[in-house]
Amino acid sequence: MIKLFVTDIDGTLLPTASVKVPEKNIEAVQKMIQAGIKVVIATGRMHSAALPIANQFGEPLPIISYNGALIKSSAGEILHAQYMNSADVIAIINFFEERGWHLQSYSDDVLYVPKRTDEVKFYEEMIKVHAVEIGWDGLRERAKDVPKVLTVSDTPEEALRRLDEAKKFFGGQVEITRSAAQFTEFMALGVSKAGAIKILAEKFGIDNAQIMAIGDSENDLQMITSVGCGVAMGNAVDAVKKVSPHITDTCENDGFAKAVYKYVL
C-alpha cells in the first residue's frame, strides 16, 4: 500500500511550459490526500516557481525543490536545506564565464543572471519566473547559500557537450544532472530528489516499499529507481524508461492520473 506519493512537475504533473494542472490530475491528487496518502512535489524548479503549482490542490504540500537541495512546505516551513560550497559555486561561475556560456544562480529563492540573454528569456517564459541581472561579479558576490546553478543551452546537443565538459572538471565534486533537454544543473554533492525523499520518509515514518515516485527526466531517474514503486511517464527520456519498473501513458494522455488510479488508489 502506497503511503507517500512523490511527483515531478514538468512533463509529469503538467505539460512543460504550462501553468495549469489538468483537472484529472487535481482530482487524482485530492483523492490521494483524502485517503490519507502524503503527496509531495519534487522538482528542479526553485521553490517560488513550484508554489503556484502546489497551491492548485487546495492543501499544503511539502515541496522538494532545486532537485532536492531544499524541502519546504507550501505553507513556508523549511524542513531541510543543503547548499553548495561557495568555492564550488565560484569555480563553476568562472568556468562558464571563461567559455562565454550562459549560467544562472539562485539565492534566497531569487533567480540571478549575469546578463539578459535569449537563454534567460527562454527560461523565464518556460518556468514563469523573473530573473535579476547582476553581472558575473554579482554572481560571485552571491555564492553563499546557493542551492543550485543552471545553464541553458541553445540545443540538446550543446547541453550534452557542456555536460560532458563540466563532468571532466567538476565530476565527483558536485552533483550534475539534466532536468530538461537544454538544462544542465549543478548541486552540492549528494543532493538528489531521491535523497530528499528519504529524508521525508524518515520524518513521516514511512517504509521505502510504501513510496511511489513518478517522473520523466534524468533528474527523476534516481528517485524512480530508489523507491518501492517507480513509474516513468510515457513521454520520459529513454534513459529513464529503460530502468523504470513501470511506465504509464504520456503527460498529454492523462498518464499521471492513470498511474495514480492504477498503482495508488
Image: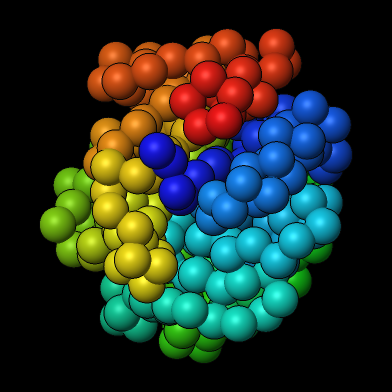
- Image quadrant assignment for residue 239: top left
Taking 192 as reference, is 83 above or below it?
A: below
For the question of whether residue 24 can be seen, the reply is: yes
Left or right: where 18 falls relative to 99: right
* Outermost residue toward the left in this view: 172
Residue at image coords 38%, 18%: 246
Residue at image coords 74%, 71%: 132
Q: Position of residue 2 (x, y in %)?
A: 43, 41
Q: Is 217 in front, or is 198?
A: 198
Left or right: where 258 falls relative to 81: right
Residue at image coords 27%, 49%: 208
* Quarter of the picture holding the N terminus: top left
Taking 196 as reference, is 99 above or below it?
A: above
* Quarter of the picture holding the C terminus: top right
Q: Position of residue 113 (x, y in %)?
A: 64, 66
Taking 79 as reference, is 102 above or below it?
A: above
Taking 179 as reference, is 36 above or below it?
A: below
